[in-house]
Structure formats: structure tokens, C-alpha cells
Image: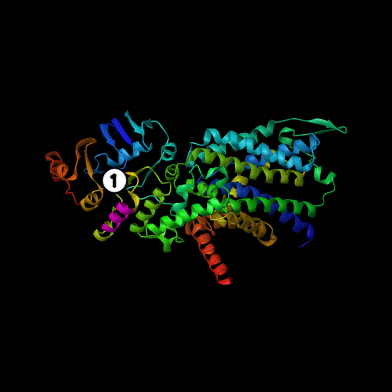
Amino acid sequence: MDDIYLIAVLSNIGMISFIALSAYLLLVVGEISFGQQAFFAVSAYGSGIATAMWGWPIWLGLLWGALVAGAAALVVAIPTVRLRGLYFSVATLAFAEMVRLIFEIFTYQVEIEGELVGPDGSDGFRDIRAIYDSNVSDFEYLLIIYGLLSVVLIGFLILERSRLGAIFRMIGEDPLLTEMQGLNVNAYKILAVVMAGVVAGIGGALYAHLATYVEPKIFNVMLGVHALAYGLIGGLGTAVGPLIGVAIDIGLLESIRAISGYRMIVFGGLVAVLLIVRPRGLLDEAAVHWLRGRWRGLVRAEN
Amino acid sequence: MLRIEGLSRSFGGVAALEALDLAVADGEVVGLIGPNGSGKTTLFNVITGVHAADSGRVLLRDEDITKSTPAAIVRLGIARTFQNLRIFQRMSVRENVWVGQHSLPSVGPLGLLSNRSAAERARRAEVDGLLDAVGLADRRNVLAGSLPLPEQRRLELARALARSPALLLLDEPAGGMTPAETAEMAALIRDFAVPGRTCIVIEHKLDLISTLCQRLCVLNFGRKIADGEPGQVLEHPEVLEAYLGGDTLDA
């Protein structure tokens, strides 16, 4: 295995981890979204437009992409917040398909150095070259991806132990009982959807700049379905769960060439088996609770 | 504390509450009894905003809360437990009490994120105090779903008290318990939950009611048929009729 291939695989794992965390956050609040790819797409386009067309620096483009994705999520969250279960899922799917179809016809180009740059409908958006223009190597970009992923992951881990994280879990388990603790369930659900949109957006912006080219069909529903499956495989007890899911899928199934042809068969089978034997994934709440208990025991033994 | 005026609520043509009037004074402990389906839990659900009232008003300290959301009502100082037990099964015992504090004004937006502030440590100490009081101190790190039923009921009580509510609504706090467990629960409620607050208790078990309540209110088919001192109420002919027609009082 050569270095370039390894860097490409690791970059891919890193970028997909963001959309996995995004879908995971909604699974925690008890909702299944088939539409997180829409926020990934909105940010990919938004950040690409900012850097390639408006000449913004890369870091500002990433930030802008994440913010636009968060704003799109807010637009989705307000009308759908009262929907539960299947109705919420269908609404997110419909929204994502709508976004994809809009990008199929969305054309916005400007001439830069004699060439037309910008989204061109179904032909996609080429030449998002910011990282190459500023001489960032693939390895350096890998570090940027994992740096941002670490920040987001640490944020999730802090959230998990905070009251806000507990509120998200409470809503996922019993919305009425959550309301009965004096908490406005709909407001917190909107917050979760927006946060999930921002997280997916960071991944989308990183993706657009590494690939330099995006087109609407990349952001089809299969991306969203995978994002969901990562949490369901790796576990819903902690944010580390979906990352394990990504590592299993992309790290093992897609990247080991001998088995990559059977990826979807193995992956689909894995999801089906886990849903039956461990419906909340490998690291479910009980497993995480047990691990924390062991950890506390170890810390106490040390002292 | 609480005043209910002409409250009605029906489900698909069946009247669960019919023109109900009830006033509960500060510090009073009222037992709410009645046969199954007489509207007791519906009354709790309407007071807490889970179900909307068809007509009538609910006033808490003279403030009309009939149309408020459950969250807003809880923040005004009402806490309740549930007949069919509601706890967060996937959280630890300690977290189940801790969650009761989330919406306290003293927590605020920053408190929702910080784990290490002195105020947060003080609040966690309060949680441990409550667990101690209901006898769950050594169970605090267990997942709540794995507790046996009597302990789950005590956990629910601790969670309801976490906000220091002015009005406490207990829906069959000893449901499914043995006589010994019931006596323990009654003592716990009397000595720990009731002092300093107003309380309405739905219960079938007479020994619990007689331990706790100075006043008894009987519902039948959504109407109040008796209200007063327990001794008199239980002699009331309509009450005897309602019960002996179907259930016995200790059922």
C-alpha cells in the first residue's frame, strides 16, 4: 500500500466522519434523517463558491460553508420539528432530494482569468482549487481534516457529559417526560438539527476542496443512508461509535481491495445483523455505561 | 395554591372529566381516589398540560395555566410522577435525578454546558442528597432501567423533587408494591416529600392515603362525588356505591 493511497483513504474516512457524526446527533434525539447529505452538499457548493469565485481564503470558505449548512438546517428544522418518526424521515429525504435537484439546474458562473468558474447545473462545479493554489499538500490537508475532526469530536465528548447532551438523549428516549422536566423539546430539537447541519457542513466543505470538483449526483440518498448506518453499527452510546462505523466501512470494506467488490453485501449484512442483535450498535448506552464504570474504578485504584 | 373551575375533558364522546371544581390550599395534602377510569390521571394530565381542557380553567397561584405548555407549567413549580412509571431507562440512577434540574433558572444556558463550576458541583451534591433520602445512594451508578419496581418509584419521586416543586402530583406512588414496601413509601412521602409543599396523591391503597392525607376527594365518571375528611368521605353512600358496585377499596 503506497502513501498516496493511504492518505486518500484516511482523508476519506475523516471527511465522511463528519456526516456520520451529523446523522448520529439526530439518532441521539430519536430521529432518523435520510437527508444529512443535503447539508454536506450545501456546504460543498457554498464553500466552493466562496473560495473559487469570491476569492475568499480557505479557512473563511470552510467557516462560510458550515454556516450556510447550519442556516439550511434551520430552514428544515422549523417546519419539521413537530414531525416524529417516519414523517420526519420522509420530510428530510424529500428536502435532500429537493436540494440535489436544485443543484442539477443551479448555474452561477463568473469569468476568472478567461475561464468560466462556478456551478454549472448537472455538469457540476469544477476547479475548486484553493488548497492547491496555496500549496497545501495532501498530507497537510489530511492534518487539517483530522484537526477539525478532533475539535468536533472533543466538542461531542464534552456535550455528552453536559446537561445539554443529556437533554438530547432524554428527547431521544421520552419526549413527553423531557417536556415534564420543564424543557421545551421542540426548541432543543431545532438546536440539534442545526448543530447536525453545521457538522455535516464542515465535512462537505472539506470534501469539495480535496476533490476540487463536485456534482449533484455525489450527494444522493446513499450518502445519507451510509451516514445513518455508521452510528447504528458503531453505537449510539457515544460519539466514538459512528467513527468506528466509518472506520469499519471505509477502512476495511472499501479500502482492502480483495473484499471491496463485496462491500455493499458485507456492509448491508452487517447493518442487518447488528439491528437484530444490538439495535443501538456496538457501543450502545449500556456498553458506554459499563466502560465508564470500569474507568472510574481504574482511576480510583490509581489514587 | 391550585384552583380548578368547571374543568371538562372528553375522549371520543366519553367524558373523562365533567365540570370539575377543586381547590387545594397551600400546604394541603389531598388524596384523589375513585374507581378505574374515573378521571384521576386525566385530571393530572390536564393540570400539567399533557391534555388540553375542553372547557374550564386551571389556576396555579391565581395564574391561568389552562393553555400553557407542559414545560411552562413545570417551570411554574409543578412536578409529577406517572402511574405507569416513566424514567430514562438508558441513563444512570443519578442522571435520572440530575435531569430534573436542567430547566432550573439557576442553571441557565452556561450551566447546560459546564460540568465543573462550583454551582454545578453544588447541584450534583443536591442530587446525591436526594438519592440518599430516598434510599438509592448506593445504586446511583446503576442504569435506571435495571432497578426493581419499588426502587424505580422512589427514583421517580426523587426526580420530581429535584426542582423543589411547590405542588407535587403523585400518581399511584405505591402502585404494584407489597404492603411492606407501601408502608415504607408512605413514610418516605410523609416525612420527606410532603413537608413544605402542597400535594395531590392518587392512590387506591387506603393505608397510604390515611397516612398522608387530611382530605379526600372522590371522582366517579369524571365527576366529584365527595370531598372532605377521609373518615366522612369513606362513609358517603355514593362513594360506597361507586366502589362496592365494582372494585373494593384495597384492590
Q: Position of residue A124 (x, y in %)?
A: 73, 37
Q: Tell which of A197 and B147 is nearer to you.
A: B147
Here the colouring is rainbow
Relative to residue A197, is residue A174 drawn left or right? Answer: left
Q: Secondary structure at mark 1?
A: strand
Please indicate, yes or no, whether residue A187 appears anywhere in the rendered image: yes
Q: Is residue B55 above or below residue B148?
A: above
| Residue B91 visible in the snapshot | no
Instruction: Name the chain letter of the residue that bears numbered label 1.
Output: B
Q: Position of residue A141 (x, y in %)?
A: 77, 51
Closer-to-camera residue (A85/A221): A85
Quarter of the image with the N terminus of chain A is: bottom right
The image quadrant of residue B146 is bottom left
Residue receiving disc 1: B201
Residue B251 in magenta? no
Q: For residue A118, what is the image quadrant? A: top right
- Front-most of residues B27 and A4: B27
Q: Is residue B185 magenta?
A: yes
**Picture residue at 29% right of the left edge, 46% below the top:** B201
In the drawing, does residue A201 fall left or right of residue B135?
A: right
Q: Is residue B209 above or below residue B49?
A: below
Q: Residue at x 61, y 49 (%)?
A: A21
Task: Sort mark 1 into few (<14), some (14-19) or many (20+) by Cα contacts within 10 Å.
Answer: many
Q: Main secondary structure of the magenta part?
A: helix
Q: Position of residue B180 (x, y in %)?
A: 25, 61
Q: Which residues lie in the magenta part? A: B183-191
Q: Where is B17 relative to A221, above or below?
A: above
Amino acid at circle 1: Val
